[in-house]
Image (cartoon, helix red, strand yellow):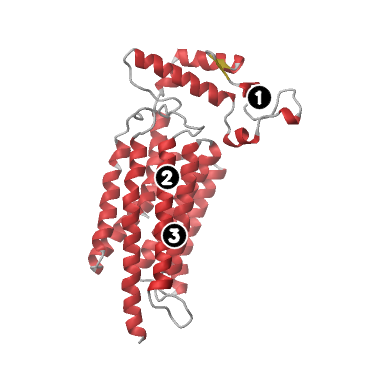
Amino acid sequence: MIDRYWIAFFAAFSCVVGVFDASAGDADPLYRVCVAQCEKTGCVGDRCFPHCKFPSDGASLNRPWYMQEPLYLQWKQWDCQSDCRYDCMVDREKDRAALGHGPVKYHGKWPFKRVYGIQEPVSVALSALNLAMHFHGWLSFFILLYYKLPLKQDKKPYYDYTGLWHIYGLLSMNSWFWSAVFHSRDVDVTEKLDYSSAVALIGYSLILAILRSFTVRDEAARVMVAAPLIAFVTTHILYLNNFKLDYGWNMKVCVVMAVAQLLIWAIWAGVSRHPSRWKLWVVVVGGALAMFLEIYDFPPYEGYVDAHALWHASTIPLTYIWWSFIKDDAELRTSNLFKKAK
């Protein structure tokens, strides 16, 4: 849960910074001339792009349907402009390195090296690992409840937050999936899906934090708590997708929800004296420390590993500890409820 709190915050933060950043790379006259020339000729030096005879929308210029751009290129939106920008960026960075200058941002992003068409391969791989960690945590949670802990006569778990954690697991995996997709290719649709899934997870996590910390077990009470938050999060996602992708407003919303649930979990752990409270505190403190990797932004090492990628790496062990806490909580609650049921 904690690992994705910071995603929406710093994704929004980085985008806000990008808006105010002059992006020295794409303001470079030599870069601009290179891109303009490439879009006319389809070539950067000796490298030419066959699909530059197609416009940016993927449709063919005066050519029949069977000559149109391949579907896999249309889906990934590797159009002429994208390839021209990338190769011109690579050439300019080589020239700058030869003159002893460091990397600069282009269109608000650091210059990454593509691998098999993937824009940020390390972040993609680490997002996939985070997804795998959540899948492992959710699966082990499922096995613990249904195969290791005692069940009721109707074969249902005693743990009264089972369904809520199942939903959390699915939302987490969905969020990391779209994170991997977004880092593989940053376009409008992947950006919105990444932001929307992260906001949905953060909003749901706040609901879950309230329900668990205040031990809300009655279904009617749960609905009363969840309904206004679900309505707000849904409205916010619709606003981002259909009206304006406002990075500043999104950052404020995500920070408020994230800080609220972090405080709820941290205070509850201390007040309740949960046996595994140290795991919860490790996740909260670890997540807070990991955010400095986002604040200390630096160019990608060798064109692959930047601060954001390292932050992705830091969330992997935190995810393992977090699911360990969830399983400990399930065991504790099951033990207490099982004793009462006897």
Question: Residue at position x 46%, y 53% from top?
Answer: 173
* Left or right position of 202 against 39: left
- Marks 2/3: CA distance? 17 Å
Neighbour tally class for label 1: few under 14, some 14-19, many 20 plus, Cα within 10 Å:
some
Q: Amino acid at mark 3?
A: Tyr
Question: Which residue bears the numbered disc 1?
Answer: 54
Image mark for residue 64: none
* Position of residue 128 in the picture relative to residue 337 (left or right): right
**SS for callout 2:** helix
Closer to the camera in the image, 337 or 244:
337
Q: Earlier in the sequence, mark 2 or mark 3?
A: 2
Q: Secondary structure at mark 1?
A: loop
- State whether residue 119 appears in this view: yes
Q: Quadrant of the C terminus?
A: bottom left
Mark closer to the chain start, 2 or 1: 1
Q: How many numbered circles are shown?
A: 3
Residue 127 is marked as 2
Q: Is residue 217 above or below residue 66?
A: below
Tell me the residue that label 3 is attached to: 168
Q: In this view of the protein, which residue sits in the foreground, 56 or 330?
A: 330
